[in-house]
Amino acid sequence: MLMELSPSGFGDLAMKVLHIESSSQHETMEFARKNAANFLSLANLLMGLLSVLCTLNGMWQCSAWLLLIGFMLDLADGAVARQLNTCSALGAKLDDFADFTSFGLATALLLHTSGFLDSLLVVVYVLAVFTRLCFYSSGIPFMYRGLPCTYASAILACASLLTGNHTVVLRMIAVIMIFFMIDQGIYPHDKILESQLWKKMVFAGGVIAMLCSFSPLACLYHLVWSLSYILFPEALWSFKV
């Protein structure tokens, strides 16, 4: 026998359903807000893992492009965390692990080892990234000690694409990047999405270049961008609101 509901009973039931749906939607939105930066770090980690797989299967062009996508994701995750006020110890660890995977392991594999010395260079590069991430702290607000591995990776990825993955050129650049990462020189925190408008436009240009076409022009754009950070860190990239 079906239970009969009065009009007021139907109204109460509808209100309860709407309240539950509203509460669930609010919880979902809050979860997405709190973990937005973590999702970007996970996406960066995924790019690194896919890059490793592509390199192991001889798809070095795909591998290099994935590293450049990871480069863009890494620049965005910190800004998102700070803007949404969701910085956390877990997020910092996740970001470091993603950086080590993408800009350490995956980038080093671009060097295409074929002998003992080549393998040694790969190991040294990975250790340089590990040292840079774990032990270098400037103690100065808005400053890094040692070249951020994201920019070293972007330069190697661009060099790989523009030179047809020329192994000699890549190894020479890798050695230079190792010295830049471990020399403890001071580099400004880019905070590219939280600084001057022109820096945000540089980032937007990088996104547009990647979306429009995976072409040498897009690669050259990222190369000039990364080199400008190394050559003119204070003049161009010091953090200014």
Image (cartoon, rainbow, N blue to C red):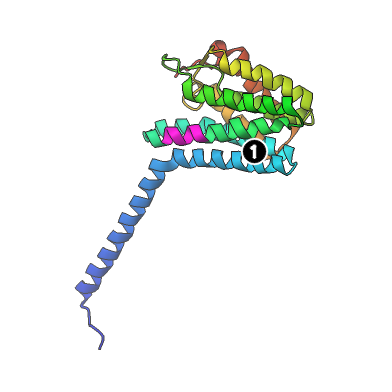
In the displayed structure, 161 sits above or below 230; it is below
Q: Secondary structure at mark 1?
A: helix
Left or right: residue 96 compared with residue 19: right
Q: Looking at the image, which residue is at 44% across and 34% down?
A: 93
Q: Which residue has dot 1 on it? A: 66
With 88 as the anchor, is 43 left or right in this view?
right
171 and 149: which one is in front? 171
The quarter in which the N terminus is drawn is bottom left
**Where on the picture, by quarter, is residue 156?**
top right
Q: Is residue 147 above or below residue 215?
A: above
Is 218 part of what is drawn in magenta? no
From the viewer's side, name the closer residue of 206 and 178: 178
Vertical placement of residue 199 versus 214, above or below: above
Point out residue 235 in the picture as x, y percentages from the top left corner: 56, 10
Total number of numbered labels? 1
Disc 1 crowd rating (10 Å Cα; few below 14, some 14-19, many 20+) is many
Q: Please identify the quarter of the rendering in which residue 129 is found.
A: top right
Give the dominant element type of the magenta stretch: helix, strand or loop: helix
At 57% from the left and 16% from the top, the residue drawn is 182
Q: Is residue 222 visible?
A: no
Look at the image and give the residue range highlighted in magenta. 91-97
* Amino acid type shown at disc 1: Leu
Can residue 58 be seen from the camera position used here?
Answer: yes
Residue found 62% across the figure and 15% down from its top: 179
Residue 148, image x, y percentages: 55, 22
Can you give x and y, in whole percent of width and height, for residue 122 in the image? 66, 28
Quadrant where the C terminus sits is: top left
